[in-house]
Amino acid sequence: MEDAVYRAPPSDGLLIAPLDEFTAVYNRASGITHLLTEPAPQILVAVQAGAWSLDALLDRLGRDYDLADGTREALTARLDELMEAGLVERV
């Protein structure tokens, strides 16, 4: 979906705690705790700051982080995983 916009639930809906190489994310709506590894926590932080198109999100992440695989396909795959977990939504 070319003009899709991605966002996270309201900031009070998630509790985020870094744990060494993992990040624990508790989703209050579902009651589930997820363990994430890079770059998923960075994507989640970015979409908590507001709604982003795929290209804008890729640009922001590329500026803020050293992305090992900074392609649209890779970001789409990570966003799909985060959506499946209920941590990101497409609007």
Image: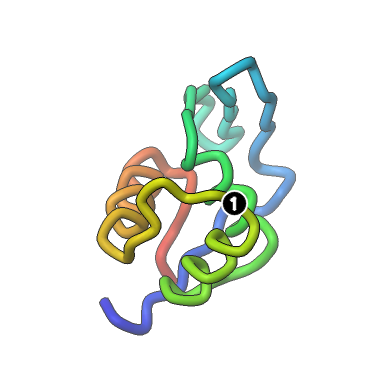
In the image, 43: left or right of 86? right
Residue at 61% x, 33% y is 28
51 or 21: which is nearer to us? 21
Residue at 48% x, 41% y is 40
Residue 16, above or below 57:
above
Mark 1: which secondary structure? Answer: loop
Quarter of the N terminus within the rendering: bottom left
7 or 39: which is nearer to us? 39
Residue 45, above or below 25:
below
Quarter of the C terminus within the rendering: bottom left
The residue positioned farthest toward the right in the image shown? 12
Residue at 40% x, 65% y is 90
Residue at 59% x, 51% y is 65
Q: Position of residue 59 (x, y in %)?
A: 52, 71
Q: Position of residue 25 (x, y in %)?
A: 58, 29
Q: Position of residue 17 (x, y in %)?
A: 69, 25
Q: Which residue is mark 1?
A: 65
Label 1, residues with CA under 10 Å away: few <14, some 14-19, many ≥20: few
Q: Amino acid at mark 1?
A: Tyr
Determine which quarter of the picture holds residue 55. bottom left
32 or 39: which is nearer to us? 39
The residue positioned farthest toward the top in the image shown? 20
The residue positioned farthest toward the bottom in the image shown? 3
In this picture the colour scheme is rainbow
